[in-house]
Image: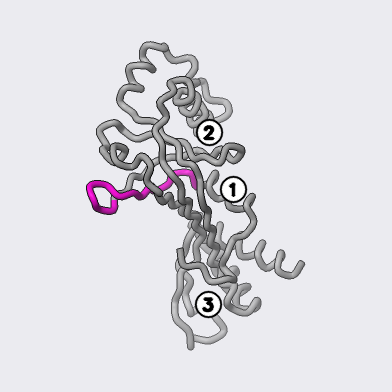
Amino acid sequence: MYIPKHFTISNAEVIYDIIEKNSFATLFSQHNGEPYATHLPLLLNKEEGFLYGHFSRQNQQWSDSVGQNVLVIFQGPHCYISPSWYETNQAVPTWNYVAVHVYGELEIVEDEKELFESLVDMVDKYEKPDSSYQLENVDENFIMGMSKGIVGFKINIKKIEGKAKLSQNHPTARQELIIKELEKSTDQNDIHIAQLMKRNIKNSKG
């Protein structure tokens, strides 16, 4: 990923937080000699250095992804930035965003226990704390039958790149003008980018 120095996220915990908050990812590999992508939720295991997920068995991307160096993209908040918000119109529009790219080797999870545990972790992540649904309570035979329709995998993380393009290449006064306009919006992407920009300015001031 192209990352100018001032847009680089170097803090590993910040990167992990982006992954966990934006865990519906896009997984790219070469399939039948062409680029191929699947959109799916992935779970991060920081301690082991793996991403866990599963394909539909009918999605043949898994069949030739094993051993490949695959790319996973986690897309954070993003929004349009208008030059009309600046102190001058002698400027061009841009787009602010946060993204993380993860590179690693994909392997199939053959162990049924490891696969089931990854599925339980995924359900626990997305179900609300007061939800009555727990995968462990579903009939074992039903789970085994449904599991035949998926292929579990894990990605051994080799490299992570984080980018936060938050107008850091503009003067602080202009960044504050942008924040002011974004905070008028009801769009959650706009609001989140404004919050990240404010935090970035605060951190840069020490």
**Image marks 1 and 3: residues in contact by CB distance under 8 Å:** no
**Kind of residue indicated by mark 2:** Lys
Q: Which residue is denoted by mark 1 in the rendering?
A: 17
Q: Are marks 3 and 2 in contact (CB under 8 Å)?
A: no
Q: Residue at x 48, y 14 (%)?
A: 137
Dot in front, 3 or 2: 2
Q: Between 99 and 63, which is closer to the camera in this rendering?
A: 63
Q: Which residue is identified by label 3?
A: 85
Cα distance, mark 1 to mark 3?
30 Å
Alpha-carbon distance for marks 3 and 2?
Answer: 39 Å
Quick one: SS at disc 2? helix
The quadrant holding residue 63 is top left
Task: Give the CA distance from mark 1 to mark 2.
Answer: 14 Å
Name the residue tied to disc 2: 125
Q: Quadrant of the C terminus?
A: bottom right
Density class for disc 2 (Cα within 10 Å; few <14, some 14-19, many ≥20) is few
